[in-house]
Amino acid sequence: MFKIRRWLFALLWVVGAGLPAVAADLDAIKARGELRHLGIRYANFVTGSGDGFDVELAQGFARHLGVKYTLVYTDFYNVIRDLLGKEVTVKDGKATLSGEFPVKGDLIATGFTVLPWRKQVLLYSDATFPTQVLLMAPAEAPVQPIAGGQSLAADIEKTKSLIGKKSLLVMERTCLDPASYGLKGKGFDLRPYTKNTNINEMVPAMLAKTAEYTLLDVASVTLDMQRWAGRIKIIGPISEQQEMAVAFPPDAPKLRDAFNVYLQQIRADGTYDKLVRKYYPGIHHYFPEFFARLK
């Protein structure tokens, strides 16, 4: 009888070892003693050098929980799969999960924009950062920046009209996905950037004539306007103002709630504002209302 039980246990262990890991909630992470942060090299959120706004944010959260911190690099195409162990596909704004894959992280913190289709499969924290998608062009392009009108909605429509027949660089399944802003299927000459999911490469690709214009988020714009000073310009807004947040598996509500408590604490003691000014010193100018309501 003992031999049979031992054989059965061994069999179950082998079978179980081949199964995908499952997402962990707060108690499981504390028991494991490790918080795995899924990060994508992107602007100053995750720099690729072991630091960044979201890296320090997640490191502080790990200390708050009293566990070890581990950064796990991924990309925009695989990040949700690495969190949920499921592949995500999006069609007509509806997200569908399928397949079985290893779970590699416990949260996504990487300048991760809150998008309607992502909310269908993820739990988001309170907002960690403001954002917006803009239309960018080379400085020498004849198109001129919009003057700005009485409403953001009108400015967005005016900006879209300026695209005309020009080619537009986009990146699907990210915050620069044209489907999220009513640009897909409308006759625009969309040029998806497919070499990788590094949004930092959008402006260099545009300047290399991959496309005449590009979409870009404000966080990247604040850095690229310095990096490519005199070579690029902002034409106008493509989206409403948006928010970024940390994403969690839908079955990890306690972990999400613990992060929100931690976020409230660092906002109150000034740590959050120091991180913002360290990595994005000019962002308050773009979104004064967002930061004012945090005080």
Image (tube, rainbow, N blue to C red):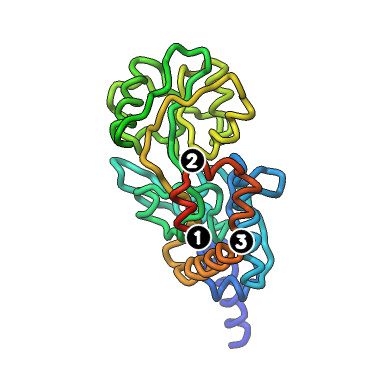
Q: Residue at x 49, y 42 (%)?
A: 77
Task: Indicate the amino acid at tag 2.
Answer: Tyr
Q: Residue 44 in the image: state x and y as whole percent.
A: 62, 43
Question: In this figure, which residue is indicated by the disc labeled 3?
Answer: 270
Residue 220 position, x and y percent, is 55, 36
* Residue carrying label 1: 295
Q: Residues within 10 Å of mark 3 (few under 14, many from 20)?
A: few
- Image: 191 above or below 4: above
Residue 271 picture location, percent across and down = 63, 60
Corner quadrant of residue 155? top left
Q: Residue furthest bottom?
A: 1
Are the residues tagged 3 and 1 within 8 Å (C-beta)?
no
Identity, as a three-letter code, of the amino acid under mark 3: Gly
Q: In terms of sequence position, does the residue under pointer 2 or pointer 1 come before the other? A: 2
Q: Amino acid at mark 1?
A: Lys
Say if mark 2 contacts mark 1, CB within 8 Å.
no
Residue at left offset 42%, top offset 22%: 145
Dot 2 corresponds to which residue? Answer: 286
Q: CA distance from mark 2 to mark 3?
A: 20 Å
Helix, strand or loop for disc 1: loop
Element carrying mark 2: helix
x and y percentages locating residue 195 in the rendered image: 55, 29
Disc 3 versus disc 1: distance between alpha carbons? 10 Å
In which quadrant of the rendered view does residue 102 lie? Answer: bottom right
Residue 270 appears anywhere in the view: yes
Observer able to see residue 87: no
